[in-house]
Image: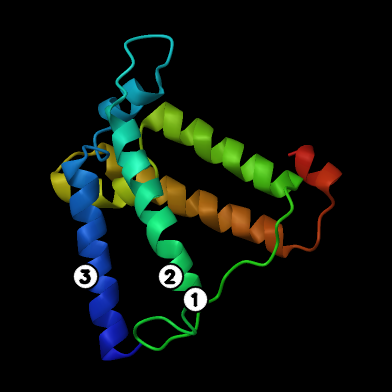
Amino acid sequence: MTRLELIGATASGLLFGFGLSLSQMVEPQKVQAFLDLAGDWDPSLALVMGGAVVVTALLFPWVLRRPASLSGASFSLPTRQDIDAPLVLGAATFGIGWGLTGYCPGPALSALTLGFWEPWVFVPAMLLGAWAGGGYARRGTASAAQLADV
């Protein structure tokens, strides 16, 4: 990693973490209140997500027209466009975990700095799950039926 890439990654990470804290996405209760459509729903996080969608919609076409990143590194964009069983299973697992705990990976890492004990339990479990899922995927090209039986 070049010095420019390191500076860019650090600045991006700090900005992302600051935004997560400012929007209160590092607070599980806030996230769970957003997901509680049948109860005391708090729609404020929809503004955060809407803001992210607007920024992406405005800037991603510009990014795609560039031959490389601002640091000169090449882009590696996904080429697959199909929806298969591993994608659905992974999305469902992510959503269930997010709903149960109120954490997703970015906010959980940011929450490590806030002095709460919960992210210190969640992050190692998340890393273990990512490791286990990666190992399962590396064992070979499992069929969609095999993955659906998990």
- Residue 61: give x, y in percent of width and height: 47, 65
Q: Are marks 2 and 1 in contact (CB under 8 Å)?
A: yes
Asked whether residue 112 appears in the rendered view, the answer is no
Query: Which mark is drawn over residue 11?
Result: 3
Q: Residues within 10 Å of mark 3 (few under 14, many from 20)?
A: few
Asked whether residue 38 appears in the rendered view, the answer is yes
Dot 2 or dot 3, earlier in sequence:
3
Residue at 39% x, 43% y: name it: 104
Is 74 situated above or below 125? below
**Observer-nearest residue: 18 or 128?**
18
Amino acid type, callout 3 = Ala
Residue at 29% x, 20% y: name it: 42
Query: Which mark is drawn over residue 62?
Result: 2
Front disc: 2 or 3: 2
Dot 1 corresponds to which residue? 65
Is 32 situated above or below 92? above
